[in-house]
Image: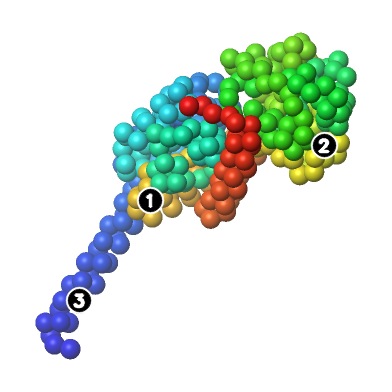
Amino acid sequence: MTNTLRRALLRAGLATCALAAAFGAAAQQFPTKPVRIITPFPVGGGPDGVARLAADKLARLWGQPVVVENRPGGNGFIAIDAWKRGAKDGTDLLVLDNVHLAAYPALFKKLPYDPQKDFDIALPLFKTHFFFTVPTNSKYKTVGDIIADAKAHPGKLNYGSWSVGNPVHLGSELFESVTGTQMEHVIFKETTQLYTSVATGDIDFALGSAGTAGPLYRAGKLRLVAFAANKRSADFPDIPTVAESGGPKDFEVTGWNVIAVPPGLPAATVDKIRKDLAEILKDKDFVERFKTFGYEPFPTTPEQFQATVKAETQRFGDVIRKANITLD
């Protein structure tokens, strides 16, 4: 090996080390300016509360202001567009849910974003399961009762949700599909109106989370018939699963929120964001907030999460196509 070649290789090695050191230093220093968490959810409610608590914890950890910017409306497209036009260095974070990533590809012929390419998921924030809720004086004591009545009177029973394509609507459509029943979907303007209507008996039932339907349940205004998960809720151990209540086996309806970052960030920066988010999610304030809203931690690896998105995209897609649901 000539001296010239040795010097060239040495320079290349030093350059590589300098580049790696620069990336490492950048990750250690991240962030060097204020951070935004852009969310498609309105002020108030569970997702907004979790985002604001995360912002407060991250600001203390990072030594930089972290603000939540609510951009509700437009099926989440307003928030996504604002984020896409924002900073690409990781200081603009985005909150998404399973509808944005797994349901909209089937609900819209063309989306203003590519769920496979436009987002790098930093970390899932939480997940939640849903209960079957009915009025306190309802004749339905079990999910089996709902199925039997729906089969005896096709199209007569109704259930509610707050829009087309949300997890409650699609979960109810899935319930119709797997039970071979036909029911009417009633849309309400907001979640409080929806569950108040359950309590007053204006609709027969609705899927609801501990955060949305829980307050009325605790006030004795409605009943929880079953929990749409494979095992009972630790916070509501007396409520049977759907299968235990005479419904289909393994019937599950979930919602989840994630934090996304722009694709192409240095791996060290993404790893830092993930590590710091995972750390604050273990904080006792988060544990208590999760209990308040009926949320659960969603620990998973990036590979496991991609498998979750793929499976849910398939499941939502099958339901949407079978029911011929569209938002175009």
Determine which residue is flagged by label 3.
10
Residue in front for this viewpoint, 123 or 112: 112
Label 1: how many Cα within 10 Å (few below 14, some 14–19, many 20+): many
Horizontal and vertical percent position of residue 3: 12, 85
Foreground mark, 3 or 2? 2
Determine which residue is flagged by label 2.
247
The residues bearing labels 2 and 1 have C-alpha atoms spaced at a distance of 46 Å
As drawn, is 309 to the left or to the right of 63? right
Label 3: how many Cα within 10 Å (few below 14, some 14–19, many 20+): few
**Residues at discs 2 and 1 in contact (Cβ within 8 Å):** no
The residues bearing labels 3 and 1 have C-alpha atoms spaced at a distance of 28 Å
Horizontal and vertical percent position of residue 178: 74, 38
Q: Secondary structure at mark 1?
A: helix
Q: Secondary structure at mark 2?
A: loop
**Residues at discs 3 and 2 in contact (Cβ within 8 Å):** no
Horizontal and vertical percent position of residue 70: 44, 24
Q: Earlier in the sequence, mark 3 or mark 1?
A: 3
Camera sees residue 54 = no
**Residues at discs 3 and 1 in contact (Cβ within 8 Å):** no
Q: Please name the residue shown 78% across and 35% down the image.
A: 179
As drawn, is 302 to the left or to the right of 91? right
Q: Secondary structure at mark 3?
A: helix
Q: Earlier in the sequence, mark 3 or mark 2?
A: 3
Determine which residue is flagged by label 1.
269
Q: Amino acid at mark 3?
A: Leu
Quadrant position of the N terminus in the picture: bottom left
Q: Amino acid at mark 1?
A: Thr
